[in-house]
Image: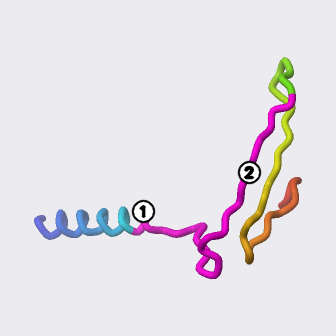
Amino acid sequence: MHNMHVLSFSLCVCITISCIFIPDAFDTFDPNGNSTIKWDVISWTPDGYVAVVTINNFQKYRHIQPPGWSL
């Protein structure tokens, strides 16, 4: 019974550590690159607002898909 507790605790620790240190968006070829998204609210409407969205891509090796739906 003691071995099961040690095994389950070790498994929980390994899963927690692996989830914390996952570098999903890190790019080793361009470590200082970033993308900036800016909202400029132009006017307010009864159901929300009208805004201009500006996306700047300062990454060398990744592209940003154009707006719209993709499947």
Look at the image and tell me in which quarter the C terminus lies: bottom right
**Residue at the spot x=23%, y=63% of the render?**
9
Q: What secondary structure is marked by label 2? A: strand
**Res 49 → quadrant:** top right
Question: As drawn, which residue projects farthest toward the top?
Answer: 46
Given the image, on which type of amino acid does mark 1 rest? Answer: Ile
Which of the pair 50/38 is nearer the observer?
38
Given the image, on which type of amino acid does mark 2 rest? Answer: Ile
Q: CA distance from mark 2 to mark 1?
A: 25 Å
Q: What secondary structure is marked by label 1? A: helix
> Circle 2 is placed at which residue position?
37
Which of the pair 40/69 is nearer the observer?
40
Q: Range of the magenta residues? A: 18-42
> Circle 1 is placed at which residue position?
20
Magenta residue check for 33: yes
**Residue at the spot x=64%, y=77% of the render?**
30
- Are circles 2 and 1 on residues that touch, CB within 8 Å? no
**Residue at the spot x=43%, y=64% of the render?**
19
> Percent x, y for residue 31?
59, 74
Which of the pair 64/11 is nearer the observer?
64
Number of the front mark, 2 or 1:
2
31 displayed left or right of 64:
left
Looking at the image, residue 38 lies above or below residue 18: above
